[in-house]
C-alpha cells in the first residue's frame, strides 16, 4: 500500500449555522446543534466545492464511494484560547470513563475514573464488569472522603468542598474537550435562536400553528477536522493543489444565508503527525479502542459494536491493519444517523452506532505497522463518511480525578 498524507481542515463560520434539526412540539422545529460537525457534512461541503472548482470530477467521487482512499473525521469545536488546534490531540472527545462535576465550580474540568487501572485489572484476569464496579466504588469513596475532609477543615465549616463529592459527578462521554495546561475542559460553541412563521401559500398569510424556530451556532465559531488520503490518489492531489482557503456551505438553510463558512486545508508536518500516531501494541495485549466518531460495524447492515460481534478488523483505506477480539463495550447508549444524498437523490442508509467516546476493551490478535500510519484508522468503509474511527489506547489521556 502507498503512504498516507494527513491534512488539518480548519473551519470558521461566517454566518449563523444550523447543523442538524429535529421536529418539535406543535409544529415547532428545533435544531439540535452540538460541539462538533459530523464528518459526512465536512466531506460533503469540501467535495461540493472541489467539484465546482473542477479539482474533482463526478467519476472520481463515485469511485471514492465504492473504494474510498480517504477518511474524514468529525470537526471538533475549537475554543478561543487555542490557536492551531490539532484534532484528537489538543481537542478531542471525552471517553466513556470521563466525568464532570454538576456544580461547575471546576470550570468545566473533565476527569477520568481511571482507564489505566481498568486495563491493568483486566490484564490480570479480572472480569471487566467486576473490575469496573470496583473502580467506580473505590474512586467514589476516595472523592467523598477528600470532599468531606476538606469541608470539615475549613474554618467556617463551609460545605463548598462537598460539591466535589461523587454525588455531584455526571458522565461526560461524547463531550468535546480541549486541553488547557495539564487538564481538559468541556467546551461548546455559543448558540442563538432564529424564529419564523411559515406562510400558507394558498392564502398568502401566516399558516395557523406553523411557527418554527432553529437553534444555530453563532458566526465566528471555529472547528477543526482531520483528513487523510492515500498518497498519489486523486483526493490527495486535489488537496495539495488547493491554494488559500475556500468558501463552503454547511448544514441546513444554506439557500437562505445560513451555514456559510471559510475552510482552510493544511498538510500536517512530521511533528504533528507523530502526535496522532496510534500507540505501538503487540499481539496478545489487551488494549482500549476509543471511538473518535459514531462507531458501527457492517454485518452486513450497520449495527453498534457489541461483544457479540466477536472480532473487528481495523483498516486503513480498506487494507487490514489489525484484528481485535472484543471483550467488552463501555459506553452510554447508541445514536441513529440518517441523511439525504444529493449525489444519488435518495435517503442515506440509516446507521445505528455507538456514540463518540465509546470504549471497546479488546485483545490484539493481529497488528501491522500500517496501524501507526494514521490516527484515522477505521473498522470499515464508513470511515470515508466520517464514521467508525478508533484510536488505540494503552494509557489514559484524561487525568484521573
Image: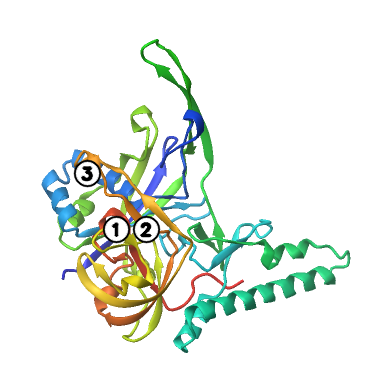
Figure check: 280 above or below 304:
below
Res 105 → quadrant: bottom right
Residue placed farthest to the right in the image? 156
Residue indicated by mark 2: 353
Tell me the quarter of the picture where residue 274 sits: bottom left
| Marks 1,2: beta carbons within 8 A | yes
Residue 371 position within the rendered picture, expressed as x and y whole percent measured from the top left: 28, 74
Q: Which residue is mark 3?
A: 50
Quadrant occupied by the C terminus: bottom right
> Which label's residue is closer to the chain start, 1 or 2?
1
In front of the other: 14 or 162: 162
Please say if 363 is above or below 56: below
Residue 74 point in image, percent of width and height:
37, 54
Left/right placement of residue 87 relative to residue 139 reads: left
- Mark 2 Cα within 10 Å, few/some/many (few <14, many 20+)? many
Q: Of residues 226 and 295, which is closer to you in this image? A: 295
Task: Name which residue lies at 58% across and 73% down.
Answer: 400
Question: Dot 3: what SS?
Answer: helix
Binning the other alpha carbons within 10 Å of mark 3 as few (below 14), some (14 to 19) or many (20 upward) gives some
* Residue in front for this viewpoint, 227 or 294: 294
Q: In whole angstroms, how far apart are the C-alphas of marks 1 and 2?
A: 7 Å
Expressed as whole percent of the image width and height from the top left, the position of residue 390 reads 36, 67
- Alpha carbons under labels 1 and 3: distance apart: 29 Å
Tell me the tag on residue 302: 1
Query: Is label 1 in contact with label 3 (beta carbons under 8 Å)?
Result: no
Farthest residue, direction top: 203
Q: Going from the N terminus, do you reach mark 1 or mark 3 first? A: 3
- Crowd class of label 1 (few under 14; some 14 to 19; many from 20; radius 10 Å): some
Numbered disc 2: secondary structure = strand
Residue 93 percent location from the top left of the image: 46, 61
Secondary-structure class at tag 1? strand
In this rendering, the answer to whether 115 lies above or below 344 is below
Amino acid at each position: 500500500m502507498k503512504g498516507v498524507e494527513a491534512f488539518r481542515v480548519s473551519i470558521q463560520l461566517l454566518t449563523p449555522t444550523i447543523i442538524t434539526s429535529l421536529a418539535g412540539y406543535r409544529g415547532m422545529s428545533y435544531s439540535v446543534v452540538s460541539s462538533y460537525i459530523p464528518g459526512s457534512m465536512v466531506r460533503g461541503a469540501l467535495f461540493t466545492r472541489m467539484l465546482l472548482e473542477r479539482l474533482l470530477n463526478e467519476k472520481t467521487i463515485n469511485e471514492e464511494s465504492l473504494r474510498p482512499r480517504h477518511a474524514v473525521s468529525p470537526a471538533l469545536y475549537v475554543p478561543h484560547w487555542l490557536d492551531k488546534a490539532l484534532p484528537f490531540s489538543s481537542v478531542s472527545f471525552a471517553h466513556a470513563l470521563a466525568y464532570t462535576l454538576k456544580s461547575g465550580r471546576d470550570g468545566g474540568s473533565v476527569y477520568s475514573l481511571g482507564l489505566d487501572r481498568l486495563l491493568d485489572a483486566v490484564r490480570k484476569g479480572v472480569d471487566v464488569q467486576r473490575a469496573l464496579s470496583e473502580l467506580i466504588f473505590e474512586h467514589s469513596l476516595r472523592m467523598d472522603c477528600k470532599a468531606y475532609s476538606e469541608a470539615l477543615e475549613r474554618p467556617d465549616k463551609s460545605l463548598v468542598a462537598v460539591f466535589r463529592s461523587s454525588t455531584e459527578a455526571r458522565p461526560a462521554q461524547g463531550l468535546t474537550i480541549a486541553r488547557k495546561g495539564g487538564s481538559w475542559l468541556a467546551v461548546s460553541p455559543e448558540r442563538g435562536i432564529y424564529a419564523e412563521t411559515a406562510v400558507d401559500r394558498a392564502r398568502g398569510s401566516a399558516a395557523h400553528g406553523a411557527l418554527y424556530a432553529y437553534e444555530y451556532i453563532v458566526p465566528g465559531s471555529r472547528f477543526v477536522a482531520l483528513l487523510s488520503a492515500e498518497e498519489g490518489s486523486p483526493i490527495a492531489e486535489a488537496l495539495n493543489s488547493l491554494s488559500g482557503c475556500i468558501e463552503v456551505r454547511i448544514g441546513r438553510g444554506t439557500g437562505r444565508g445560513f451555514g456559510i463558512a471559510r475552510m482552510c486545508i493544511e498538510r500536517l508536518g512530521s511533528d504533528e503527525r507523530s502526535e496522532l500516531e496510534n500507540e505501538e501494541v503487540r499481539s496478545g495485549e489487551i488494549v482500549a479502542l476509543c471511538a473518535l466518531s459514531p462507531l458501527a460495524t457492517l454485518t452486513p447492515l450497520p449495527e453498534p459494536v457489541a461483544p457479540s460481534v466477536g472480532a473487528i478488523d481495523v483498516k486503513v483505506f480498506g487494507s487490514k491493519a489489525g484484528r481485535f477480539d472484543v471483550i467488552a463495550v463501555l459506553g452510554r447508549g447508541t445514536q441513529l444517523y440518517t441523511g439525504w444524498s444529493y449525489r444519488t437523490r435518495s435517503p442515506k442508509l440509516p446507521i445505528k452506532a455507538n456514540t463518540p467516546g465509546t470504549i471497546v476493551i479488546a485483545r490484539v490478535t493481529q497488528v501491522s505497522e500500517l496501524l501507526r500510519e494514521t490516527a484515522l484508522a477505521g473498522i470499515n468503509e464508513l470511515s470515508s463518511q466520517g464514521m467508525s474511527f478508533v484510536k488505540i489506547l494503552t494509557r489514559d489521556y484524561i487525568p484521573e480525578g
